[in-house]
Structures are given as structure tokens and as C-alpha cells.
Image (cartoon, rainbow, N blue to C red):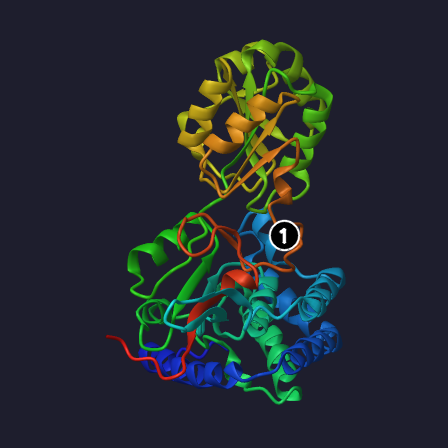
Amino acid sequence: MNDQTLDPQIHITTLGQNARKAARGLLSASSEAKNTALREAAKALRAATPELLEANAEDVKSVEGKKPDSFIDRLKLTEDRIEGMASALEEIAELPDPVGRELATFERPNGLSIQRVAVPIGVIGMIYESRPNVGADASALCLKSGNAVILRGGSESRHSTRVIVECMRKGLKAAGLPEDAVQTVGTTDRAAVAALLKADEFVDLVIPRGGRGLVELVRDQASVPTLLHLDGNCHSYVHEAADLDKAAEVIRNAKLRRTGVCGATESIVVDRSVAKDFIPRLTKIMDGDCELRGDEEAVAIDSSITPATEADWDTEYLDPIASVKVVSGLDEAIDWVDTHSSHHTDAIMTEDDEAARRFMTTIDSAIVMRNASTQFADGGEFGMGAEIGIATGKMHARGPVGLEQLCSFKYLVHGEGQTRP
């Protein structure tokens, strides 16, 4: 799993060749075969629980005292989390097969019949950081959508990833599908990442999932097309027409349900007209659980709030910390959020339909919510099954990337001997 004797370029070329061959094999795979592979992989994960927990403990031990608690939480596996991974595979097996869907059909005056149908993208490179479950989710989504995948998980999760990939390959073998549809990079040498990002001959799309540093590295170095997921600097805005008790409850969940996820609210924006009523409610409901860093007005209203620095407004904490900004009203709130948001997920708390409409149509983020926790920014919560990430760009896919977003399309043209004049 971590063979430093491997030549990174040769290794990535071998993985790419294997993946390209496996992807061709998946083109003719039946839905039944793909679903069987997923269910068998789920069985293998459950059977491997003791081995996976042992491997994960080795990963966690390697970073204890070196990484923050939020990082270790993302890395750590439990029996419940392993069961969650296995259940996610079974849930994906139950979803409709996205491949072969007829997206459009039309007849031309010359008698040609044209169909636009969904097809797999091909070979996907998945580069991610600490969460081992991403390997299982990405493998399952790629398999169901007919894509081969090359995984490059974080070096901190390498032992966990090894066991997860073995389970996925057991599922593929049991279903009679090419095992190389799921592979993992076998070295932690960073040169292998660089090689993967340049492997245009074999890799059709690279998807990074992790912090801004990883995503910017991929963006800057890749010659392979990319589907980017920038950091989640998500905002929750309390409008003057908000139900303040409801807003406080929603924002507590949006911040603290899990602080290490990309959909966690990091910044709370409050209308000045309700700030003196709302901010004490906010500090009370967050008391002891979340550090609040605010502007001068917020600090003046409640001295328990720490003065914020300029850096706070653009920070994805992934920890129990949130910034608090007081604004003059809807227009300033929109300007503030649009300036400082990472355009992942932003929310407005209001009972005013027109204010909600203006905020939701003007904020240029992948997901915009009203009176709901930003932690609902998740493919599963959208009814899409597991997701491979939240795309914050605007091309190909945006928001939760599930099965449909892992497909491209092609045109099938049916004729009866037509020639073009």
C-alpha cells in the first residue's frame, strides 16, 4: 500500500492502463452485475470490520498530537461508521442506474432520429484527504455510474484505505466485473499525485476532496479536466423578519452538529435591527460549545464574543468557532456573503418571502437555503444517495455530485440511408 520503491510515473501509467481497460469492461456491465458488486462489497466491509478497525487505529495513532481533533474525527472509524459505509453501498445499489438514460430525443425533417443518452465519463481520479469513507463512497458511485476509479487518499488514512479497496475489489470479483475498476495509488510519494494530474492519456476527470490547499494544488497543476470542491466557508444570515428562536436553533445545528464537515456554518450575519435581540440568544445557545468572534457591534452587544480579525471573515474553521458580522440590512448582507463566501452553501433565516427570493436568486453559491441548517448540504439529504463531493464551480456539475453528475452523454443518430446534400 505504501511501496516507496515504486517509480511514480510508471506506477500511475500502469494504474491508468488497468483502469482504462476496466472502464471498457464496465460499458457492457448490466445493472444487476453492478448492484451485485456493491452488495457483495458491503458484505465484505462488514466481515472486515475487525481488520478495518485495527488498520484505522494505526492511522489514528500516526497523527495523534499532530493534528487537530476535527481532523482526527474525520479520520476515525467506528463500528457504526463502518456499518454506515456498508449501508451506503447497499443504498446506491437500490438507486436507478444512470447509464443509458434517454436525456432527449428529436426527429429531424430529413427523417434522422437523434437520441441523447447518458454514458459513463470513463476513468476518474479521486484525490482526497483524511476521511476513509470517501474511498468507499467514491468507488461505489463510480462503479454504479460505469466509471473506473483511481483513488489517492491521504497518507494518514493509507491503512484504512487499503482494507476498504480490498473489500470493493472482492465485490467486483464476486460479480464477475473487472477488479481494476477500483484501484488505489500504492505510494505516498507526492510525485504520484503530480503524475496522476497529468495522466491525460488515461484519466478523464480528477475530483479533489479536501481543504483549500489540496484543491488549489489540483487546480493549478492538473492538465486533466477537474471537478473542484473548494472549502466550505458557509454563511447563515439572520434577516430582520426572521423568527429569532427558530434561527438560533437552526444556526446551532448548522454550526455544531458536526464542525468538521464542509456544510457547517462558519459565519453568522445578523441584521442590525434585530442584533440586540438575536445576539444574546445566539451566545446563550452556543454557550460553552462554540467560540464566537465578532465585529465591534457584536462585541458591544455581548462581551463574551471575542473581537474578530480580518482573517476570520474568510476562514473555514472546521472547529467549534464561528464569526459574527452585523449588517445594515438585506443589501449589505448579500454583498457581504457574496464577497466572503466560498460559494458552497449559504442560508437566510426569514419569514419574508420577498427577502428570501432576493437572497436566494442573488447569492451565487452552489446551494442556497431558507430557514434550514446548512448541514443539509449533502447528496444523501437531497435524495441522491451518497455523493462524491459538493462542486463549487459552474461547469458540468454543481452542488452535490452523485450518480447523474458522474455521467456524460453522447448522441445516437438513427438513419435510413440519408446522405447530406
Which type of secondary structure does the marked residue at label 1 adopt?
helix
Q: Relative to 96, say whether 317 is above or below.
A: above
> Looking at this view, is 283 or 236 the one in front?
236
> Looking at this view, is 406 or 38 the one in front?
406
Quadrant of the image for the C terminus?
bottom left
**Can see residue 372?**
yes
Tell me where residue 135 sits by quadrant.
bottom right
**Three-letter amino acid code of the residue under disc 1:** Asp
**Residue 279 picture location, percent across and down:** 63, 17
Q: 154 left or right of 285?
A: left
User: Residue at horizontal 46%, vertical 55%?
Assistant: 397
Identify the residue under disc 1.
Answer: 73
Q: 7 left or right of 177?
A: left
**Residue 190 picture location, percent across and down:** 37, 67
Q: Relative to 125, say whether 21 is above or below.
A: below
User: Residue at horizontal 50%, vertical 74%?
Assistant: 147
Q: 84 left or right of 326?
A: right
Q: Relative to 131, say whether 264 is above or below.
A: above
Q: Relative to 164, say whether 131 is above or below.
A: above
> Looking at this view, is 119 or 340 the one in front?
119
